[in-house]
Amino acid sequence: MEEKEKMTAEGAEAKEAPPEEADLSAALSKALEAEAAAEAKAKALEDKAAGLEAKLAAAVRQYDRLQGDFDNFRRRTRAEQAEAKEKHTADTVKEFLPVLDNFDRALAHMAKDAGGTAYVQGFEMLKKQLEKVLEGFGVTEIQAEGAAFDPHFHEAVMQIPAEDKEDDTVAMVLQKGYVMNDRVIRPAKVQVVHNG
């Protein structure tokens, strides 16, 4: 009987051993499953992080484009405002040019009258004051007489023959022209030599 008990005890030990292996096997498979799940979760998080980084990079590029567009808009608006201001000033100054022309005419007429020297001096002072104000706005007279005809600065009103002058030379200024900051506000009306 002792043998039977020994066998039974050995058999019981043998029967108990597989459950330990089964537990180890189950624990190992659970650990492998957990590791695979952790790797899958890590991969999913990496993919999500890569997606978010791509979205962030796209948002940064869009921000940079918008910032550039805004800077261009601001620069363009400033340029347009400066141009509008200059045009408005030129239009205002242009309205004063006939007054300056009339000063010249009045002074030419008064110079013929010897008794009006005080008036001539007064008109000359007023004319100089008006010219100084216009110079303050950047207005200068176009020098035309004797110069080569330039359609950007001169308006040919008539052509005359003159053997002593070259063709396309301004013979006489009929009405003075003016520029303001390199922008023509009124071209000079001139006679142009044409010997043809």
Image (cartoon, rainbow, N blue to C red):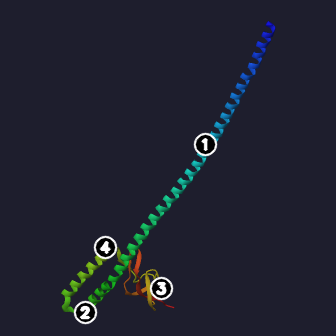
Amino acid bearing label 3: Asp
Q: Earlier in the sequence, mark 1 or mark 3?
A: 1
Mark 2 or mark 4: which comes first in sequence? 2
Query: Closest to the observer: 98 or 153?
Result: 98
Residue sitting at 28 percent across and 79 percent down?
130
The relative height of residue 65 versus residue 143 in the rendered view (above or below) is: above
- What residue is pinned by disc 4? 136
Disc number for residue 45: 1
Could you say which is closer to the camera, residue 172 or residue 51?
51
Tell me the kind of residue under disc 4: Gly
Locate residue 90 relative to residue 57 in the image: left or right: left
Please provide percent x and percent y for residue 106.
Answer: 27, 89
The type of residue carrying mark 2 is: Lys
Which residue position holds label 2? 112
Eye-nearest disc, 1 or 3: 1
Image quarter (top left, top right, bottom left or bottom right) of the N terminus:
top right
Q: CA distance from mark 2 to mark 3?
A: 33 Å
Q: Residue at x 38, y 73 (%)?
A: 85
Determine whether the residue tagged by mark 3 lies in a helix, strand or loop: loop
